[in-house]
Amino acid sequence: MAYTEEELKKELETKEYEYGFYTDIESDTLPIGLNEDIVRAISKRKHEPEWMTQWRLEAFAAWKQMEEPEWANVHYKKPDFQAISYYSAPKKKDKYESLDEVDPELLETFNKLGISIDEQKKLAGVAVDIVMDSVSVATTFRDTLAEKGIIFCSISEAIKDYPELVKKYIGSVIPIKDNFYAALNSAVFSDGSFCYIPKGVRCPMELSTYFRINQAGTGQFERTLVIADEGSYVSYLEGCTAPSRDENQLHAACVELIALDDAEIKYSTVQNWFPGDKEGKGGVFNFVTKRGICHTNAKISWTQVETGSAVTWKYPSCILKGDNSIGEFYSIAVTNNYQQADTGTKMVHIGKNTRSTIISKGISAGKSQNSYRGLVQVNPKAKNARNFSQCDSLLMGNDCGAHTFPYIEARNNSAQIEHEATTSKIGEDQIFYCNQRGIDTEKAIALIVNGFSKEVLNKLPMEFAVEAQKLLEISLEGSVG
Amino acid sequence: MLTVNELHASVEEKEILKGINLQVNPGEVHAIMGPNGSGKSTLSTVIAGHEDYEVEKGNILFDGEDLAELDAEQRAHKGIFLSFQYPVEIPGVTVTNFIKTAINASRKAQGLEDMPANEMLKKIREKAALLEIDSKFLSRSLNEGFSGGEKKRNEIFQLAMLEPKLAILDETDSGLDIDALKIVANGVNKLKNKDNAVVVITHYQRLLDYIVPDYVHVLYNGRIVKSGTKELAHELEAKGYDWIKQELA
């Protein structure tokens, strides 16, 4: 890494979260339950064109025929899909008069993450005197991008303003019938982000879905569409490190990436949804479908740090359609207490000389279960395809579990596929060694975990790297001794 | 500096130390010798504060303070350092990052700010030179893939960086060839001054040719059965431990 940790820290201290936008949606809530009328009503509230309404209805019809998948290594009480309200505009109502009324544990976490007081207030839902003017920030930001012809807006706006692009690409990587949750998302998605990078343009800044503060109001069913036109480059950041306490139990997002010839998309996620309490009560179910398609010479990198959610079901994938295209997946998944994660990737090699790399780091503590599930598929025409997979698991304590489910399907003799897997345990001798050098147990665990996760942390954009390190530390607090 | 009084300690309900008495003063070098299983490593581990070891009787005073209530990291902050017989690996954490974390943890405990980066770098360079450590070594993962000699040299590097009052060297000579042994011993001797003390735990006389002890103690079956000057080490080398055993029988 070119930067030292100190430099990163310094950079973070001086750097504000300067990017972001916020879309105001008229606030009202639809009755609970899901049927065609509700799907139509969602589309209508969002003033969508007829083709979009039809697309949603088609998805809904497909979803009705589908069953919730059961193959993942997770156990939970299935949500009652008729007991959910599918359209609820982000509420911006202040819940408290001052920070004194907020859960001190939450505030402590904010402090550890180094979140400013104003942001803390926003996140916790406290009335703020000075409202940060996100609209004006967004405007300046969009002007810079507009000069380069980059479109970065909410998916709702994109449907209205760039219908041709949306129509062409939405559902092109994740078809509406792809899976149960993707079909549900396609039918009822509330909002999300849209990004288009024109031919040959290198996006000059990291695109970030939200202001850190806006994240607090994110809806249940996000839809993201990123299109990198020929020869373009974009680095995209999603999520936030601040803990999101959300009343919505079910989150089913869809992210589609399209990297046209010679384009590159780097997509980084830090996910920290409420994982439930120490007894495993509450917590978010995060059922996400993420997939990208690479055309000739294109490259897609997924980097994710997953620390939150009670149940995670997520497999960011790459379809390596074009010759010489490259897919990468770098993941850190942390589970503690009663969390369950079943996460991994799919690398589908279709083009010649396609290459993929998978580095997965699973960290389990408490009574949690952490599974890596990955598919490497080499199709008959994918001559000289290469894959390297490395899955490492770190266990803390005796009550947690780590599982690896690698699937390899090679239908071309020239394919080279390597898979390495390790499982280790944070040893008491490692902790004692650190203690003897004056490092307390919490810090020792953080040090060991960061060392273990280093290869993936190094792939994160700088803004995220140090925050992600702190997040790992906080997520595992109290997990040993 | 270190006073061990009638120390009885056990691990997994098995008594290993059966009444140890030891007085180490500033500026002194003590050697503790003894056959396998006599309790040498247990003694160092108990002084360092491993929680699996139960002190049944007696106490350990450090600068007059009873260590009973202090955790291992607090003892480290007070200036107790243990060079491990088998240093553990911590993958992905570099030698440099580890020592920085350790130094700043101790500084924090003393109410000091983190050591400024340039000062840290200077100190690392200086101590690495003292122990003839290559700069490439410093960016390797702690003890991962290290040879026996590299591990021990790294322990002494940490000792040099942390500058403790009391250094306990547990079988530092094992796994070292003669050249590495000289470098390590030379490093320890240069760090030695009138205000700090060293306790060397070893099977063999060899290391004591280079780190010359003021006192030699023989540990056998959980007790110090004989104490003397460096001549005692020579005698042991010549006669073996059976001589002591017979004397006790």
Image: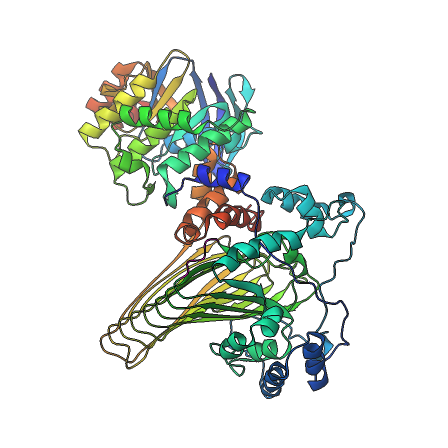
Give the vertical position of A315 relative to B70 (above or below): below
Q: Position of residue B121 (x, y in %)?
A: 37, 28
Residue A308 place in picture, x, y as percent? 58, 58
Q: Which residue reaches farthest right?
A: A97
- Asked if the stretch drawn in magenta spans residue A359, the answer is no
Q: In which quadrant will I find the C terminus of chain A? A: top right
Q: Nearer the viewer, residue A296 or A361?
A: A296
Colour convention = rainbow
* Residue at image point 39% right, 52% down: A455
Q: Position of residue A215 (x, y in %)?
A: 63, 57
B201 or A372: nearer the viewer: A372
Instruction: Name the side, left or right, on which A295 lies relative to B239.
Output: right
Residue B249 in sight: no
**Which residue: 57% across, 76% down?**
A181
* Rendered residue at 77%/76% (across/down): A31
Which is nearer the eye, B169 or B246?
A: B169
Q: Quadrant of residue B232?
A: top left
As drawn, B7 above or below B147? above
Main secondary structure along the magenta-highlighted residues = loop
Q: For the image shown, how many numbered marks are present on the structure?
A: 0
What residue is at 22 percent from the left and 29 percent from the top?
B180
Quadrant of residue A200 within the rendered picture:
bottom left
Q: Is residue A202 magenta?
A: yes
Extreme residue toward the top, this view: B194
Q: Nearer the viewer, residue A366 or A8?
A: A8
How far across and down, in percent of the image, does residue A301 sit?
41, 62
Q: Is residue A234 above or below residue A155?
A: above
Q: Find the magenta span and give its range.
A: A201-205
**The quadrant where residue A186 appears:** bottom right
Q: Is residue A472 visible?
A: yes
